Image (cartoon, coloured by chain):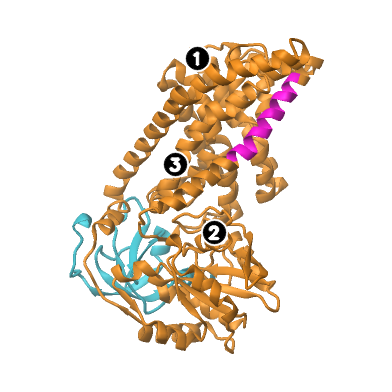
């Protein structure tokens, strides 16, 4: 398992654990971040900037501190349709 | 009968509301545009019904104050009321959670499956029959911005159903949603379009930040170009060649001279300096400020409807964290540059009182509204645009400083950004123009009466000698601390009402550029205008607003004094 903050860009993972309080989980759930959901990390973080992920065809920005509390199991290291602008 | 428009943030509730009622509400392409609720009326089969545009919410457990408003409205639903549940068709799974919660409450519902036109090119297919079978409520596909499906929606409101569903646990809800989406929705993968590549390029830090700087620079240049052009080629010729001579002639017929002539026309051929009700009173709001209001809201509305602002929020997040806010607060600040009132209202989506306090204090001290900016550009800009940038630079530094200090001294910490980034949309020209018109009318309705009242008050107070008395009393602060003549005191007093008039009142004083910079800065910082003040008392509470006011007064004294000392 790896945290969303540490996960490599352009990889997809399945959420396994949301390590925070009730409030944190409720907030995550509101945007459909739940155990078992597949998300793909899209943007690299610079100076702890928010992490951008793709889930169900939508983009969501997650603050760095929150991203550290989302743990995933990596599915594929290398995405089949790499996006050139993410290098 | 009440009709509640409900749904997740940024699914188009406000657009549907406008379409249903013909009423005017601001809608944009980012979550949290509606923070209060708006009511309108609609006739269904000859019967009046009330339609309420409820703030967007993801679930019935509130996180922010805007959420609380929504939850409260649901609690107040009475027999015979109906919910129009607006669902983003491109984001079905997430939307269904709120749908389930609402269904469990047993309130009759009709579902508007909005953004139906986006479904296909996002590679999503939805089986409407299956979805109807599962949810057992009428489902109408809609494209609200284009007005598609609205007629069917109205025609079917009476058919709203409340299927009997027991109260579910969270797990049960997600299990049901999983089943529904698995059978009724099919997502295929497809290649990214140009617009989507642009969406990502403007969101990633290494490409997004340079683009953001470029966007802001172009916006500023465009606003100034359009504002100045309108003033120089439309407003000034109108006021000085046509309206001015005419109105002076007309007034002279009735009041050749004396008190009334003085109050109506003033005593200068310059329409800023004259301080007459029919000269300055109309020239300042229409001739000087309106062109900039128009230019600003044209650019802002465009950026809003495209969906750029949430990306700006993400990019600004790292910096905003240093001053105790998260990226979304940048939207409040951008709105504040238009007018502090909507800026202050938009802080409702911020989750904690701490964030709201910091954001509001920053708005009041460091974000001059467009009316004020127009006057600053007009007056200070005459000495060179560099001085305008100097004023803004000082204000920005004040903002950063206050933010840094507040973040370190206030207990608690600010929550982090967690928001959906909407797709780019090509703006719908009709809605864009409607929004622009609404904002301009809002400005005129609020500004013109206050400007007139302000000018009337100055004239009366000056005539009876009170202005002179107050000026003498406050003179030491102005002269010793700020190095300004005591004649700026009346401007400061009118600044409580309208900052644009206040900046205008500096003009006849013929201040040096140093004094002009100090006076503009102090006027921007020392106190919010009356409209903003009362909104903030309501939003923050009296105690926090008193604290914020204390900060403003302190800053205006020290910063004004510091510039006076340092600038040799």
Task: Tell me the distance, in whole angstroms, between the alpha carbons under discs 1 and 2.
Answer: 48 Å
Residue B298: which disc?
Answer: 3
Q: Same subunit under labels 1 and 2?
A: yes
Residue B513: which disc?
Answer: 1
Q: Which residues are magenta?
A: B443-459
Please tell me whether residue B130 is drawn above or below residue B207 in the rendered image. Answer: below
Say if the magenta span includes residue B256. Answer: no
Please tell me whether residue A77 is drawn above or below residue B435 in the rendered image. Answer: below
Please tell me whether residue B91 is drawn above or below residue B19 in the rendered image. Answer: below
- Rendered cyan, the chain in question is A
The residue identified by callout 2 is: B18
The reply to whether discs 3 and 2 touch (Cβ–Cβ < 8 Å) is no
Q: Name the residue at 46% across, 87% down.
A: B134
Looking at marks 1 and 2 on the same chain, the residue that comes earlier in the sequence is marked by 2
The reply to whether discs 1 and 3 touch (Cβ–Cβ < 8 Å) is no
Count neighbours of disc 1 (C-alpha within 10 A) and say few if under 14, some if 14 to 19, many if 20 or more: some
Q: Is residue B552 visible?
A: yes
Looking at marks 3 and 2 on the same chain, the residue that comes earlier in the sequence is marked by 2
Q: Name the residue at 56% across, 51% down.
A: B347
What kind of element bears circle 3? helix
For disc 3, the chain is B
Q: Position of residue B424 (x, y in %)?
A: 35, 56
For disc 2, the chain is B
Q: Position of residue B505 (x, y in %)?
A: 62, 19
Chain B display color: orange
Looking at marks 1 and 3 on the same chain, the residue that comes earlier in the sequence is marked by 3
Say if the magenta span includes residue B451. Answer: yes
Residue A86 is drawn in which quadrant? bottom left
């Amino acid at each position: 398992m790896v945290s969303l903050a540490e996960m490599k860009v352009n990889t997809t993972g399945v959420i396994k654990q949301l390590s925070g309080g009730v409030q944190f989980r409720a907030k995550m759930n509101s945007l459909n971040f739940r155990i078992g959901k597949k998300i793909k990390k899209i943007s690299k973080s610079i100076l702890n900037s928010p992490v951008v992920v793709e889930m169900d065809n939508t983009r969501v920005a997650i603050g760095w501190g929150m991203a550290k509390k989302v743990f995933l199991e990596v599915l594929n290291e290398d995405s089949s349709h790499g996006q050139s602008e993410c290098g | 009968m009440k009709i509640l428009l409900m749904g997740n943030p940024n699914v188009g509730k406000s657009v549907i509301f406008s379409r249903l009622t013909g009423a005017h509400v601001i809608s944009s392409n980012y979550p949290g545009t509606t923070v209060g609720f708006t009511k309108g009326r609609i006739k269904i089969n000859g019967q009046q019904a009330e339609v309420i545009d409820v703030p967007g919410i993801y679930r019935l457990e509130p996180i922010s104050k805007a959420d609380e408003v929504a939850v409260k409205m649901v609690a107040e639903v009475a027999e015979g009321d109906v919910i129009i549940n607006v669902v983003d068709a491109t984001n079905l799974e997430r939307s269904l959670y709120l749908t389930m919660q609402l269904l469990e409450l047993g309130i009759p519902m009709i579902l508007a499956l909005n953004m139906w036109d986006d479904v296909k090119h996002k590679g999503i297919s939805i089986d409407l029959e299956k979805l109807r079978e599962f949810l057992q409520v009428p489902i109408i596909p809609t494209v609200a911005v284009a007005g598609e499906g609205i007629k069917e929606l109205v025609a079917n409101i009476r058919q709203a159903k409340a299927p009997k569903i027991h109260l579910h646990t969270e797990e049960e809800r997600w299990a049901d949603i999983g089943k529904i989406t698995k059978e009724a929705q099919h997502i295929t993968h497809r290649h990214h379009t140009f617009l989507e590549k642009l969406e990502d390029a403007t969101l990633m830090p290494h490409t997004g930040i340079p683009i953001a700087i470029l966007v802001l620079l172009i916006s500023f240049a465009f606003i100034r170009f359009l504002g100045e052009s309108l003033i120089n080629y439309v407003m000034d010729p109108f006021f000085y060649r046509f309206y001015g001579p005419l109105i002076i002639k007309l007034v002279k017929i009735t009041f050749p001279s004396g008190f009334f002539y003085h109050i109506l026309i003033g005593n200068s051929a310059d329409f800023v300096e004259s301080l007459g009700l029919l000269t300055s009173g109309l020239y300042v709001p229409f001739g000087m400020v309106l062109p900039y209001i128009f230019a600003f809201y044209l650019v802002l509305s465009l950026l809003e409807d495209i969906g750029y602002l949430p990306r700006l929020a993400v990019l600004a997040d790292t910096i905003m964290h240093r001053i105790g806010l998260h990226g979304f607060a940048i939207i409040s600040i951008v709105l504040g540059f238009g007018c502090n009132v909507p800026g202050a209202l938009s802080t409702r989506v911020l989750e904690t009182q701490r964030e709201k306090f910091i954001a509001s204090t920053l708005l009041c001290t460091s974000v001059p509204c467009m009316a004020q900016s127009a006057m600053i550009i007009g007056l200070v800009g005459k000495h060179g645009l560099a001085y305008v940038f100097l004023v803004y630079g000082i204000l920005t530094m004040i903002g950063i400083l206050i933010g840094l200090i507040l973040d370190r001294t206030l207990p608690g910490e600010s929550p982090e950004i967690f928001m959906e980034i909407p797709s780019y949309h090509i703006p719908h020209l009709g809605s864009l123009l409607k929004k622009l018109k609404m904002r301009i009318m809002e400005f005129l309705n609020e500004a013109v009466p206050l400007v007139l009242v302000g000018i009337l008050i100055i004239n009366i107070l000056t005539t009876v000698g009170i202005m002179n008395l107050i000026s003498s009393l406050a003179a030491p602060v102005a002269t010793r601390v700020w190095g300004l003549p005591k004649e700026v005191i009346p401007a400061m007093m009118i600044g409580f009402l309208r900052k644009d008039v206040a900046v205008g009142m500096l003009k006849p004083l013929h201040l040096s550029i140093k004094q002009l910079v100090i006076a503009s800065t102090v006027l921007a910082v020392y106190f919010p205008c009356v409209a903003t003040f009362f909104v903030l008392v309501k939003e923050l509470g009296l105690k926090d607003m008193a604290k914020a006011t204390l900060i403003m007064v302190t800053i205006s004294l020290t910063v004004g004094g510091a510039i006076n000392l340092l600038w040799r």
